[in-house]
Amino acid sequence: MLGRALLSLSHSERVRHLVETAPISRNVVARFVAGKGPDDAVRASQTLIHSDLKVSVDHLGEDTVDRTQAEGVRDAYLDLLARLSDAGLTGSAEISVKLSAIGQVLPGDGEKIALEYAQAICTSATTAGTTVTLDMEDHSTTDSTLSILAELRKDFPSTGAVLQSYLYRTEADCRDLATAGSRVRLCKGAYNEPESVAYQDAAAVDRSYVRCLKVLMTGPGYPMVATHDPRLIEIAGVLAAQNRREQGSYEYQMLYGVRPDEQRRLAGAGERVRVYVPYGEQWYGYLMRRLAERPANVAFFLRALLTKG
Ligand code: FDA
């Protein structure tokens, strides 16, 4: 209930303004977001990479309203890639892109614009020696995102996909995408989705996650197990062993600031672990999704409000 309320608030301009200007926000945000600028993202990536972790850096921003804004996001990614390359990090740092941030939902030729800008980002990532993963957003964009992914993979076959186990359709999508070399990040899903398209019950989402993971681990692709859930992490390990997968033929992924001890534990056990590192001015929607996921995060937020506010 609380989670759904917070996800609804992620669209409220009034609450956005309140949270963005609250004196506490900086501390709360710093736990989940690397900082406002690309230098912050590079610095955070450097620290994580020095602890044997990999990263996927995300320039925060979604629901772009015009072409100029989309262009700005594309340029921010080109700049980020140049900085990661200059810092010698692209062997361990890739990037994550939300297509809505580069124009996907603009009326008319939004999808075409997003494809064009994603191609520019993928070209630059390839030159820098790294890869791009397309984040998945709410279900109304799934078909469009998968069709842009298919187009991008013609020239950039290592482009990563994201699938969300809360959607009924995802097991079938996993079967389609479990092909040789196909990088697929499997997560539970972070948006407020209706019963017509998504499981509402947490246990059903988890069961779907396991079914989807079985498909990905059995296939010849590259599964990216994006979860903090201890049970699912354990099951992923068992499935990898059952399918005689070597470490490095799949990876674990977690969010910046979430279960850092577990990130280091897995990496220490020889697993490949990638941390999703978000940075940028537009942290509000991202923060609200993190708060919605876990009551303890809300308590942390409220405690910070009371002590600093
Ligand atoms: P969930 O939130 O259900 O938590 C399960 C269990 O994990 C908890 O009971 C607890 O044991 C443990 N746990 C979780 N958070 C913890 C914490 N802070 N401290 C201690 N234990 C904790 N979503 C999306 O829709 N599109 C996308 O593109 C992406 N991309 C993405 C990338 C990466 C790398 C990750 C890790 C996640 C995403 N997500 C996403 C978000 C994803 O869909 C989901 O909302 C969150 O990962 C939370 O779900 P969990 O699987 O962690 O389980």
Image: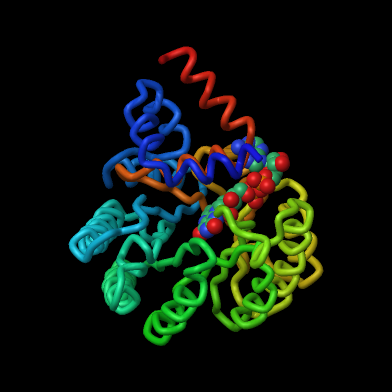
Colour treatment of the image: rainbow
With respect to residue 263, does 104 lie above or below? below
Which quadrant of the rendered structure holds the N terminus?
Answer: top right
Which of these two is toward me, 43 or 14?
Answer: 14
* Place of residue 256 in the rendered image (x, y in percent of width and height, measured from the top left): 49, 43
Q: Residue furthest left?
A: 68
Which quadrant of the rendered structure holds the C terminus?
Answer: top left
With respect to residue 88, does 305 lie above or below? above
Which of these two is toward me, 151 or 223?
Answer: 151
Seen at 45% across and 66% down, the residue is: 133
Seen at 62% across and 68% down, the residue is: 223
How many marks overall? Answer: 0
Residue 121 visible (yes or no): yes
Residue 267 visible (yes or no): no
Is 245 situated left or right of 70 in this image?
A: right
Q: Residue furthest bottom?
A: 154
Seen at 27% across and 43% down, the residue is: 37
* Place of residue 41 in the rendered image (x, y in percent of width and height, measured from the top left): 34, 45
* Place of residue 89 in the rendered image (x, y in percent of width and height, measured from the top left): 36, 54
With respect to residue 146, does 301 lie above or below? above
* Place of residue 232 in the rendered image (x, y in percent of width and height, measured from the top left): 74, 54
Which of these two is toward me, 283 or 35?
Answer: 283
Is 259 situated left or right of 213 in this image?
A: left
Seen at 64% across and 33% down, the residue is: 295
Location of residue 25 by image quarter: top left
Is 129 situated left or right of 299 in this image?
A: left
